Image (spheres, rainbow, N blue to C red):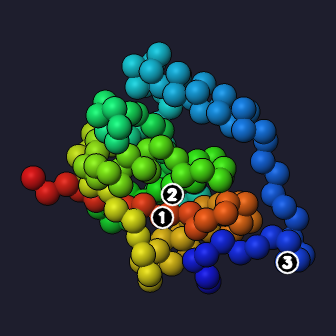
Amino acid sequence: MSSAPSPVAGTGTKKPFLPPRWVISLAWRVHRGLYRVSGGRFGLRRPNAKTYGLMWVTTIGRRSGRPRPVMLGYFDDGPNMVTMAMNGWGAAEPAWWLNLQASPDVVADLVGEQRLVTGRIAEGEERERLWTRWQEIDRGLDDYAALRPTETAVVLLEPRIS
């Protein structure tokens, strides 16, 4: 499997449906609002063999220096959590990913626990293995990734060593 997004044009596959950006943005705002209003009781979930989990990650703004929370999908890979820097499959890199690159030590809130983690990009064979795992969760992954002009970063969140 190639780690670069495959072009959709000419492959014989249909371009995947994505709702308008405002719908995607609104859906995530509602989800984050539910999490905040419920005091964290609703909105997060653990991953399982068929679906990704949802976690609340707080990065530090690369320009503001202020905490910047974001909700991300993930799956476990041993002690690590794996997510993707995809911004709802839009072209731009997500702000949380740019923040994480500038300051990789972050806090991840999961169902019933909080973890101090350090983020990094997965590369080479490790990226291939983790991308393949995401394909098991999301069968349309390659088609969605092809909508982006750049390769979608696979991000590892590893337990922070104090």
Neighbours of disc 1 within 10 Å: few (<14), some (14-19), many (20+): many
Question: Please, what is the three-letter code of the amino acid marked with disc 3?
Answer: Thr
Q: Alpha carbon of mark 2 to alpha carbon of mark 1: how far? A: 5 Å
What residue is shown with label 3? 11
What residue is shown with label 2? 84
Q: Is residue 108 above or below residue 48?
A: above
Tags 2 and 1 in contact by the CB under 8 Å rule? Answer: yes
Residue at the spot x=19%, y=54% of the render? 160
Check disc 1 and report its element: helix, strand or loop: strand
What residue is shown with label 1? 154
The N terminus lies in which quarter of the figure? bottom right
Q: Is residue 48 above or below residue 11?
A: above
Q: Looking at the image, is mark 3 or mark 2 earlier in the sequence?
A: 3
Task: Judge left or right: residue 141 versus residue 16.
Answer: left
Question: Please, what is the three-letter code of the amino acid marked with disc 2?
Answer: Met
Check disc 3 and report its element: helix, strand or loop: loop
Q: Looking at the image, is mark 2 or mark 1 earlier in the sequence?
A: 2
Residue at the spot x=78%, y=39% of the render? 20
